[in-house]
Amino acid sequence: MLPEQRDPKRHDQAPYAAPAGPTAREELALVLVAAEQPLWVREIAAFALGCAGDRRAFEALVLLLNYRDPARCATAAYALARLRDPRTARAAAALATNRLRTAYALHPVRLLAELRAPESVPALLSTLERLLAAQDRHLPIALACVEGLGVLGDSRAVPVLTAARDDARLRKAADRALALCTGQPAAGPRSSA
C-alpha cells in the first residue's frame, strides 16, 4: 500500500509497522525521499526502517529527534536506539549539548544513556554542569542527565552528581546515581541543621 493510498481515518491500516522484507524496505526508503509526503508518512516510514535496522532512516530519524513535538522525539529516539548506526551517539550528543535546544533535549539525553556510547558520559556531564550553573535548570532535562549518568555508572560523574545533590529537586535521583557510580549505598536524607 502506497502512502497516498492510506486512509488516515482507518486505524487498521498500518503499512509501515513492520517491513516484511527487502521489497517493503525499498518502498519505505522511497517514501523518505519522495516529494510532497506529509511529515507523518515520513515519520512512520523512518520509524519502521529504523526499527528494522535500515540505516537509510538515519537522517530522517535525527531530524525527528530534533523536532519540538515530544511524541515525535520519543518515537525517533526509540527507532534510533534500535538502528545501531554508529553516527547516532554523535548526533544525540550534539542535540543534548546544544544550548539553544536545551528545552527539547530530553529524548537525546535519554537516548545517550540507552546507547552507552563513548560520547554518552561527556555529553551528559557537559549538559548537567551547564544546567546546574544556570538559573533556569530545565528540571526534566537535568533529571534525565542525573538518571542517565547513574545508568552509565561512570565514576567521572561523581563530582557533578555530588553538586546536583544541592538542588532538593534532584537530590534523590543524584543519590541513586551516585550509589550506582560508586558502588556504595544511596545516601540518606540531608539534615536541615
Image (cartoon, rainbow, N blue to C red):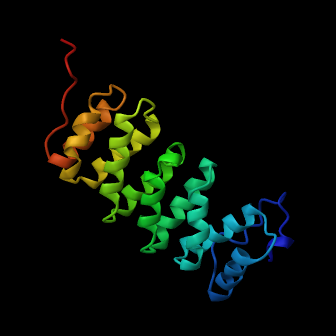
Q: Position of residue 94 (x, y in %)?
A: 45, 59
User: Image height check: is 21 above or below 154?
Assistant: below
Q: Position of residue 49 (x, y in %)?
A: 60, 74
Q: Position of residue 145 (x, y in %)?
A: 37, 45
Quadrant of the rendered image containing residue 1: bottom right
Image point (71%, 77%), residue name: 33
Which of the two residues, 19 or 143, is positioned nearer the viewer here?
143
Q: Is residue 179 visible?
A: yes
Q: Is residue 142 left or right of residue 43?
A: left
Which of the two residues, 89 or 54, is positioned nearer the viewer here?
89
Q: Position of residue 146 (x, y in %)?
A: 33, 43
Q: Is residue 30 left or right of residue 168?
A: right
Q: Is residue 136 left or right of residue 32?
A: left
Image point (57%, 54%), residue name: 73
Which of the two residues, 178 or 90, is positioned nearer the viewer here?
90
Q: Residue furthest top?
A: 193
Counting the numbered discs, the total is 0
Q: Is residue 106 left or right of residue 67?
A: left
User: Image height check: is 37 above or below 112?
Assistant: below
User: Image height check: is 124 above or below 39?
Assistant: above
Q: Quadrant of the C terminus?
A: top left
Quadrant of the rendered image containing residue 162: top left
Image point (31%, 56%), residue name: 122
